[in-house]
Amino acid sequence: MDINLLLDDILPRVSKPARYIGNEYNSIHKPVEKTKVHVALAFPDIYEVGMSHLGIKILYHLLNEQEDVYAERVFAPWVDFEDLMRKKQVPLFSLESRTPVKEFDFLGFTLQYEMSYTNIVNMLELSGIPIFSKDRSDEHPIVIAGGPCAYNPEPLADIIDFFVIGEAEEAILEIIDLYKNFKERSEKRRKFLEQVACISGVYVPSLYNISYNDDGTIDKFLPKKTGIPHRIQKRIIKNLDEVFYPTRFVVPYIDIVHDRAVLEIFRGCTHGCRFCQAGMIYRPVREKSVEHLTKLAKDIIDCTGYGEISLASLSTSDYSELKKLAEILTDEFRRCQVGLSLPSLRIDAFSIQLAQKIQEIKKSGLTFAPEAGTQRLRDVINKGVTEEDLMSSVRDAFSCGWKAVKLYFMIGLPTETDADIEGIANLARRVVDVYREVKGNTSGLRVTVSTSTFVPKAFTPFQWESQISLSEIERRQKLLKTMLKSKNISYSWHDGRLSFLEAVFSRGDRKLGKVLKIAHEKGCKFDGWNDLFSFEKWMQAFDEAGISPEFYANRERKVEEVFPWEIIDCGIDRRYLLREREKSRKAETTPDCRFNRCHACGIMRLKGGVLCETQNEI
């Protein structure tokens, strides 16, 4: 089959054909026949979303730095293109060489969001690859996955051949080297899976037996063979100045979600927000030096021509030398009009001097995340900010000329009451009052209040909590809507039904693989897109599978319960999480350990990790 000829017929008939043509500036092309290992890096969403993800960019360029490895990109085709692919019997193919995905050695998925799981199933089907790993032969690609959702791999355990847990830059090269030897010896797929399971950070679900209790909870995980690790320890990179980071980013032909250069300044977070999975699983904190970042930034702009560079991290304002870095970069890029954006500033660290510096070239939007409407609830979640922090920050922003502010909150947090919901509206109104104090009127002011529903996540102090019911989600959203009637305030909210399903899959076990297959057969895909999401089909799939979604989402877990994700060791001690849970019930806060004593979260014991500066554990 000549895919190129078929595309000549198909592409003029679809929206945004540039999603499928490849050949972008800085894309990499190698002769397939001269490479030993062929890797398809897949993102289970459309091109514009996948091309905005930093992880896939890093792996793409890292793998292609290896002379005998060729990594190509694959994204989920939008529904119009998929319809024509099915009609013309065009298999899913890579962007660079247009090779059918079925012919690759590896197919690697990035797991960024639980509601993309049906897209994974759909992409496997479009590729002609069996959905369940047990049905694949030696002729099929080895299907791997990594990313934040891999910290609970179990809902995909029957689908993915193996997972890479943690930071993959070193692990992926070890996997590739092992595979080269495996390929040269023409050994069987099963043998490779048994060998790759011995690489630190690799989880091969098929090599473990799981037993269940009578109530449906997990009894224990047991390796099927000796030599297979009992728990999978996450991988972490020790020195970020020495780890690979690309500068020749692929520049798309079309606008993507985050269409700018990305400069990762550090990894990890120690604030200890009790709802935040990223703040737990990405520990410890490691920073890149200003000198290294300055060189990377210059090289990235030289190689891409982007007009904006974004400083990426979990909390950019926590970077210890942010002021110095911002001054250097704004001075460096002023002449060529390259703007600087800081997308994740904390309310209590907003600096008027920094704001004035970054808007010298281009003014970007401002988003603040109080998370909760009252101080009591902010203490429950250990947010570590106050109402006055927010008012001081918006006052400084308005004084600098900003007229639009977005405020992000969650509803359904543990112990939340209607008084906390009312507190969200009160905060928004106070922001309007501050603007009036600064400007004398409210002309031009736009305050956007956005809420999502709390989802209990693995490896957080709230992993034991239940999510509020769908009816309660809707009631609280309606309540807040009635409180936010103002010409200067708009309110947007995340679909509670999506949050419910996210809770199911974020805390689910491998029984959910059957649900994913049935849901896909009913047409579920692009579930994160409102116009394609069908909650009714999902409920039918759970019913046909004989599985209660409420068992996973709306059930408070017992302290002693074994969780599906505890096959993974992310470095965070269960006892620490329980202590933090108990403190949340008393609305007691835990200060940032970078500036106080160690709170014994457990990360210091992780092999290969970076120790905290304060080593006096409690």
Image (spheres, rainbow, N blue to C red):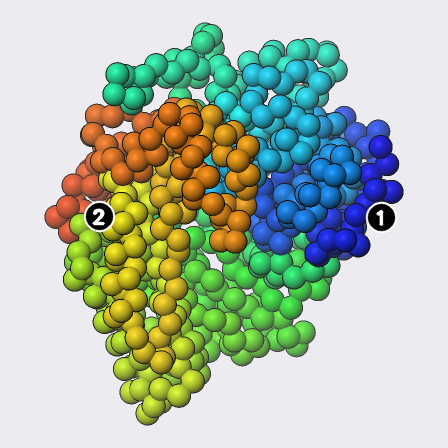
Name which residue lies at 85% across and 48% down. 8
Q: What crowding class fits label 1: few (fewer than 14 Cα within 10 Å), some (14-19), or many (20 or more)? A: few
- Cβ atoms under marks 1 and 2 closer than 8 Å: no
Q: Which residue is mark 2?
A: 414
> What's the mark number on residue 8?
1
Q: Is residue 570 above or below residue 157?
A: below
Q: Is residue 394 above or below residue 599?
A: below
The answer to whether any part of residue 134 appears in the image is yes
User: Is 508 displayed left or right of 77 in the figure?
Assistant: left
> What's the mark number on residue 52?
none
Among numbered discs 1 and 2, the one appearing first in the sequence? 1
User: Is 501 displayed left or right of 413 in the figure?
Assistant: right
On the image, the x and y values in percent for residue 146 come to 52, 35
Q: What crowding class fits label 2: few (fewer than 14 Cα within 10 Å), some (14-19), or many (20 or more)? A: some
The answer to whether any part of residue 592 appears in the image is no
On the image, the x and y values in percent for residue 567 come to 38, 24
Q: Nearer the viewer, mark 1 or mark 2?
A: 1
Image quarter in which the N terminus is found: top right
Q: Is residue 224 above or below residue 394?
A: above
